[in-house]
Image (cartoon, rainbow, N blue to C red):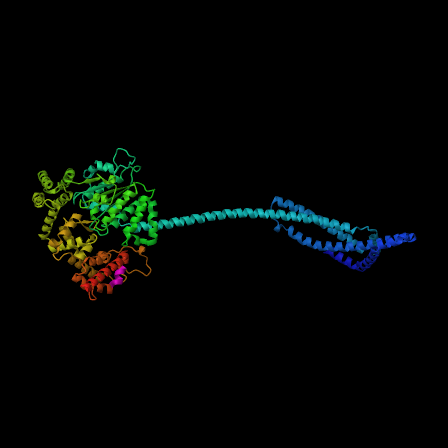
Amino acid sequence: MYMRRLVEEGLAKISRLSEITNKIGDGAGYVLWFKDVIDLAVRSVPQAALPWAGVCLGLQILQNSAQATKSNLAGIAHVISRMDWYCALTEHLLNENNVAAGKDFQAVLRQLEKGIVELYKAFLQYQMKSVCSYYRNQGYVFLRGMMNLDSWDGDLKRVTDAEAIVQNDIAQFFQEQTRTFLGKLASRAKGMEAQLGNIHQTLQEFISLQKDTRREDIESACRRDLRVVDPQHDMERIEKSKDDLLDDAYKWIVRTPEYAAFTNWDNSGSDRLSHRLLWIKGHAGTGKTMLMIGLIRQLSHQPVALSPALSFFFCQGIDAALNNATAVLRSLIWLLLLQQPYLMSHLLQKYKESGTNLFRDQNAFIAISEAFRNMLKDPQLSPVYLAVDALDECVQGRSDLINLISTSLTLSKNVKWLISSRPEVDVLADLKDLGTDSSDTSGTFVELDTQRLAAHVNTYINHKLTILKRRQGYNDSVLAEVACEVRQRAENTFLWVALAFKVLETVHGRYAIKRIREMPPGLSELYDHMMTRIEEGQVIEPQDCKTVLVVTSLAFRPLSISELSLLTDLPFDVAETAIEMCGSFLIITNGTVNLIHQSAKDYLEKNYESRLQPAGTAQGHAEIIRRSIDAMSSILRQNLYNLDYGFQPENMTPFDPDPLAPIRYSCVFWADHLCSLNSDNSWFQGELTDDGKVIGFLKEYFLRWLESLSHLKEVSNGLLSIRKILYVAQKSTLAFFTS
């Protein structure tokens, strides 16, 4: 700042002289501008040439002084303006806060700093020389200018040269700085790219995980809705309701050529036969189900490396949920998916579109069959045995199921079927009618005739005798006589033997022979005998026993004792006693009352009017409906479980006692009993009038009934029941107007 003030004061001091000098210079310049013209003029006058040369020299000297003054003024103006610029720039460039670290960068910075110092020297020298010139005697300065001693242009060139060096260094500095910053930016960009890549990968993995989780959730929901019953648990329950499975009672079939051909998976054209269907046929009571249980255990216990998958189902005509083709197929697929989950894709899309209705509506079998056929065509399908017990008890859609079996044998070589049924269902004939290759089925059935069963029934009789020996009065002679009588009357029927020994378990050995001889051979005759004994009973009224048999034979599923007590309008203890009195027809397993065998149900249906209710099944259905509606009207109320608003069902703990327990069956199946009546039945028509019991119940308790169904997770069945009622009501109205 001090130097700047000196310069400004010096310029002010010489400003007047500078103007004069510049005017003199301008005048000399004008004259010299005409020098060439005058030179031509004085060439012709020799006397004037010498004086003109002197004048020209003087004018040039005067112009030098003026030119020196102009150069200085122009130079000092340039130096002052650039000095301010470089001071500000240097403050920015050399500020440590603005300088990045790095050895290469510091080297450039030192070079730049050195150039700036040299530039400052040139600036200061020019300014100091100018200040000295300003404060000298101006005559002396004028003379120096005339002689061109100060060389202001040269000094200014040194300044501009130093400035050019600094500018070059600054350019290099900025280039290096830019390169450094770009390198760091690129490095950061790579780091960010890596981080973004990691984030992208993490997001992809998260999305994939979410998709997998979502898919697993959908697959779990699909399997849950597909499930009818766990066939493994069903097999255990059936086995518990019967006697222990004896090895000799089923292992004989393993040694047959039919079984060997069935279990041979070698399709290479070897001499060993290979068949893809094994049909076990036999009359009622010949032990088909126990034989199937044994074979299923045999097939499932093969070495893992050699064992094909196994999916099975037990048809049960006494349970509406287990006596139809849809239930069979759903259970077979359910077990198959547990063992070969990759087949789920063939079912999943349909499930996403339809949800649980895929397995429950009237087209369920058609939709599931399509998915099943696609599974069989899947090249990843591993060999699998598909076993169905008691095909004759599949009362709904059996022909569709046999058709599907026939189709499956043409779709895949990795499928084999194990089937049991009574002879009335001629599986082989049905398959031949459908065009199934005879090489897959011919000769692949085992008929349980009396000759094959004789030894195995004798083994079973001996097993029962060892148990009976523990009871009072059964010495060796009594047991020998009992064995003889049973063998003569059993006709090699396992069920007859089981029923006979069930009676003997309640009899002292002294009276055993008498009781056995009272039992006629043949199952139907034996059931007749047992019914007669019920009618002669004295413990409770025989009609109470018959009422229990009516309800159990008409029910669409096995009942709990509390449900049976309600539907028969009998006290709980009386209902229990009636079940015991009907022990030849009924059995209690895990608190559930079941008919002892399908043949018992067949007998009761065939002899319903002659032995149970002369008025026929319509009266039985009507009584079940009436008692169900009365019980539901008495028990159902709003918010039966006193749940808070917004309560989630999955958080609910079971109530004990459960107020819905006695009416569970009634809530779900009362409409099915209504639809079982003929539309021209007078009771049916009366109950569907405005004053009837059915319409009255729906008017007053409809919402409470739906609430109970929601607790029972049976809302879909409730809606289906409403559709059934509407259908039969419309049918009844149409029949009335037509008549």
Q: Which residue is drawn at 27% across and 59% down?
A: 719
Q: Nearer the viewer, residue 270 or 420?
A: 270
Task: Name the image quarter holding residue 677.
Answer: bottom left
Quarter holding the N terminus is bottom right
| Residue farthest along the bottom direction in this orientation | 691
Q: Find residue 607 and report its horizontal and vertical position in percent.
A: 12, 52
Task: Look at the image and say whether residue 734 sits in the magenta stretch.
Answer: no
Task: Look at the image and say whether residue 702 sits in the magenta stretch.
Answer: yes
Q: Which residue is drawn at 23% across and 37% down?
A: 259
| Residue farthest along the right direction in this orientation | 47
The magenta segment is 701-707
Is 211 located above or below residue 460 in the figure?
A: below
Q: Residue at x 32, y 61 (%)?
A: 645
Q: Find residue 83 and report its horizontal and vertical position in percent.
A: 71, 54
Q: Give the left or right position of residue 647, taking residue 72 as reference.
A: left
Q: Give the left or right position of residue 615, taking residue 168 as reference.
A: left
Dominant SS of magenta comes to helix
Is 376 located above or below residue 539 in the figure?
A: above
Q: Nearer the viewer, residue 704 or 538?
A: 704
Viewer can see residue 570: no
Is 705 located above or below residue 477 in the figure?
A: below
Q: Nearer the viewer, residue 186 or 492?
A: 492
Viewer can see residue 433: yes
Q: Find residue 627 and report its horizontal and vertical position in percent.
A: 18, 60
Q: Find residue 122 and report its horizontal and vertical position in percent.
A: 73, 50
